[in-house]
Amino acid sequence: MHTLEHLQALAVELIESERYLNEPKSLFEPIDYAMRQGGKRLRPLLVLIAADMFDEDVSKARYAAAAVEILHNFTLLHDDIMDNSPLRRGKPTVYKQFGNNQAILSGDAMFALAMQYGLKTESYAANAIANVLSQASIDVCRGQALDMDFEQRDNVTIEAYIEMVRLKTSVLLGCSLKMGAIIARTEQANIAALSDFGEFIGIAFQIKDDMLDCWSKVEDFGKVKGKDIADKKKTFLYLKALETADGDMRNRLLSLYNDDSAEQNEKISRVIEIYERLNIKSIAQNVVEDYTKRAMESLERVSATEESKKNLIIFANKLLIREK
Amino acid sequence: MHTLEHLQALAVELIESERYLNEPKSLFEPIDYAMRQGGKRLRPLLVLIAADMFDEDVSKARYAAAAVEILHNFTLLHDDIMDNSPLRRGKPTVYKQFGNNQAILSGDAMFALAMQYGLKTESYAANAIANVLSQASIDVCRGQALDMDFEQRDNVTIEAYIEMVRLKTSVLLGCSLKMGAIIARTEQANIAALSDFGEFIGIAFQIKDDMLDCWSKVEDFGKVKGKDIADKKKTFLYLKALETADGDMRNRLLSLYNDDSAEQNEKISRVIEIYERLNIKSIAQNVVEDYTKRAMESLERVSATEESKKNLIIFANKLLIREK
């Protein structure tokens, strides 16, 4: 078994050593740009961790690892168009840099490239990998569709929110672990349990992310404090606050959240104040811990040595105990 | 072997009996809408013809046939956004009907669905089918990128134009035949020859289409006469005319074609007049015939009975001798 640091370095190297500069340039330059915007390469890392867990040669997992990162970046690329997001990781998003049409088309080609990479996996697993990738893609689209639907609604339940997060974010983490496990030829029950681990961790991760938007201790979080509030995003915090508040406070929160004329910093402070009055921070923390616990229970179901599970436990802790 | 009419009916039935109404509706309604806009279902038909040619049970080709039609409609859907096309087959395009964001997202999901359908093919062929589909998708994206690049350029060669058409249109016809042949487990040389047939026919088809825009004998062509000219599209006719004309006429054509203030019908008549003076109609007809000949030579290379090749010959004639 390899250390997490080793696998992390491998995941980064795997993605960043690859160039995508094919012809025509107008199609491939945006792809290369998108793939070189950095990031933690968490999904490829998960593919490698899962293969390594069952003592499989991690190089057999390299195509699946590349595939899931290309797929992930394709979804970001199209999401940025739909969400009108000008910046990603401090740089102009692809559609801002190259225009809408090129971004749509290069995203499409990335999806095809992701499938091609996945299909390069050794033949015993290639079919299953392609299936997992395409199924996960449909789920990610379903999640993004729900996310856009929710923007128009004021009656989104926590349950619906969590299902949206599962589809939009978690499924791809589960898919990454699943692919590593498939490549390692482990039994079906292990593959399913690892996929569950990924999905539960993903939900915990997203709610933690929602929390860090309001209560990050670290200055350089990379996002402005309260950005979700400024963007009127329907986060776990907001939806839970609407669910928890009595009629009066509910109305105040609703009108404050949707007030475009309010001074931003003032608005953000007042929303956070309401969250705190309603105890949303500790409710959210409990939900994060609950999903983390479910993830750990899934991991326990995997029939592998305790030693081999260590990397996933460290991975989960890093994601969930972070303060930025 | 089945008759072409039988296979055509089968192809239409295969596509139109399927519904795509899953949850969430905002994702799947546009897909269902796109898949029910009609059309000749040429690509599924080609999959069936190729499988049938080698006496394979055509029902084994049904998933690949559905896959290529979904893939084709996905590319139309995204192309319509990029090209700002309000109508397709007389109905509002998906982005006009459902909005840009839903059209981007539903297109993405269609791509994933196409892969899923392809992968449902029996296991001996599933992997190859997925490979062919994803490779064809990249080629279609390359073709669309070139097409958009050409809009900005006035020095597009005929050779470059034909390569664009090959990628954007022909590859998917070749891919359809290829998949049918793979499913029929015929030898590699036959698969390659059929793929060539599809690509050559596709090029002939597109140039014929360019011609029909100017010289359709039939009133109900479904398109307005000279629409390509009105849209300032860089067709074979326009590029060949620029290549053929002397300096004076070349300048007249350039300024006329790009003149937005000209009265449309007047402009269209004058452009067609220039084409006729330069003999472009018969040059184009020769090129159509040349590519048809190449297609037929490819078909001759296929080791199968003359009888079994009849459907493809009828198919090609229908496409190329049409007057609308």
Image (cartoon, coloured by chain):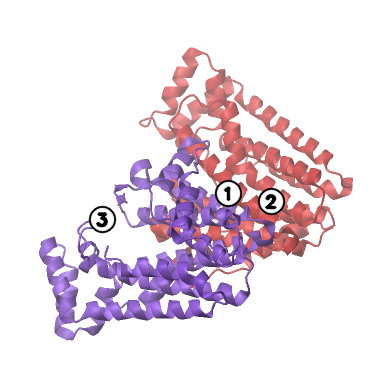
Chain colours: A purple, B red
Chain ID for label 1?
B
Q: Quadrant location of the C terminus of chain B?
A: top right
Chain ID for label 3?
A
Q: Are marks 3 and 1 in contact (CB under 8 Å)?
A: no
What residue is at 54 percent from the left and 77 percent from the top?
A302
User: Looking at the rendered structure, which numbered label has been put on residue A222?
Assistant: 3
Kind of residue sitting beneath label 3:
Gly
3D distance between C-alphas at marks 2 and 1? 12 Å
What residue is at 49 percent from the left and 75 percent from the top?
A196
Chain ID for label 2?
B
What residue is at 38 percent from the left and 77 percent from the top?
A160
What residue is at 61 percent from the left and 47 percent from the top?
B136
Question: For this view, does B269 lie left or right of residue A229?
Answer: right
Q: Nearer the viewer, mark 3 or mark 1?
A: 3
Local secondary structure at mark 3:
loop
Give the image location of residue A86, x and y in percent: 29, 50
3D distance between C-alphas at marks 3 and 1? 36 Å
Kind of residue sitting beneath label 1:
Ser
Instruction: Please state which of residues A78 and A276 is positioned toward the viewer in this rendering.
Output: A276
Give the image location of residue A312, x and y in percent: 46, 68
User: Looking at the rendered structure, which numbered label has been put on residue B176?
Assistant: 2
Q: Residues within 10 Å of mark 2 (few under 14, many from 20)?
A: many
Above or below: residue A129 compared with residue A251: above
Give the image location of residue A104, x and y in percent: 44, 49
Q: Nearer the viewer, mark 3 or mark 2?
A: 3
